[in-house]
Amino acid sequence: MTNSSSSKKHGPGQPEESGPTLKLQRMKMSKPEEAEKKNLNKKLKDVEISIPIVYGNVAFWLGKKASEYQSHKWTVYVRGATNEDLGVVIKRAVFQLHSSFNNPTRAVESPPFELSESGWGEFEIAITLYFHADVCDKPLNLYHHLKLYPEDESGSMSTKKPVVVESYDEIVFPEPSDSFLARVQNHPAVTLPRLPVGFTLPPPVPIEDTSKRKRGDTKDHPLAQWFMNFSEADELLQLAAARQQVQAHIAKLKRQISLIDGQQQQLRSTSDQ
């Protein structure tokens, strides 16, 4: 059984309102000239960087291996919406589990940002994302309700088909630093909206050779077959469907208003006679 939800949150620290105000960050460089330091930390007005993410859990029932306190094996995670490596932006993820777990505060220092455990109960998991120094100094707090059992309680559980619950969000960084934009502008996990007229992108930073480090994407993840697909095309289809419903409702209201106007005119004609 698969559940999904979709929303758009703007910015660490205030996930439901506006994006973070990025503070100037100092790059760890060997005594750069003051002019170079200012250029690296310069904020780009009227520019924003968006990072589409998905967070949720996949839970498998253990079947005959299940016990009273170990009925499911589950994984909670934060991944790129298209399974790209989020390590370019996110430095660390901290998962806060129920207090009944040993060491309930778990830190994941590198992508993929996920945690696997086993248990029997459902509870809320707090996920705190920390960003690289040139991105933002404010963490982002996410909350996910761990789901182990199908919503249809009468339905039978399966060891082959997991319960999957995912939420889509976009982390938006307004006025990014020049160095941040230069580092991520060509990265597939990053969405760069339309730039202001006359704006010139800074020279891109060479992308690291991925063959020399651990892969952080989730394209070949063991659970990838269960991940849900989130794309702009899906969102556009939903918006188009909503627009059609609104237009149909407006047309219906216009017909009702026209009918009422006709009845009023008929009543006036009758009263004049």
Image (spheres, rainbow, N blue to C red):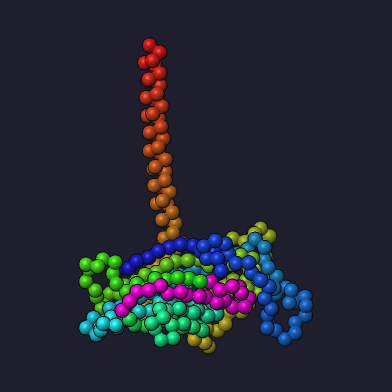
Q: Quadrant of the C terminus?
A: top left
Q: Which residues are magenta?
A: 120-140
Name the image quarter holding residue 1: bottom left
Identify the residue at image location x=40%, y=23%. 264
Residue sticking out furthest to the bottom: 212
Above or below residue 213? Residue 170 is: above
- The reply, left or right, for residue 105 in relation to residue 138 is left
31 or 191: which is nearer to us?
31
**Picture coordinates of residue 42, whole percent (x, y):** 70, 70
Residue at the front extreme?
Answer: 99
**Is residue 259 visible in this depiction of the protein?**
yes
69 w.r.t. 140: above or below: below
**Residue at x 49% of width, y 68% of height:** 52
Q: Position of residue 174 (x, y in %)?
A: 61, 65
Is residue 270 depicted above or below 81 in this figure?
above
Which residue is most to the top? 273
Would residue 225 be seen by someone viewing this image from the given angle? no
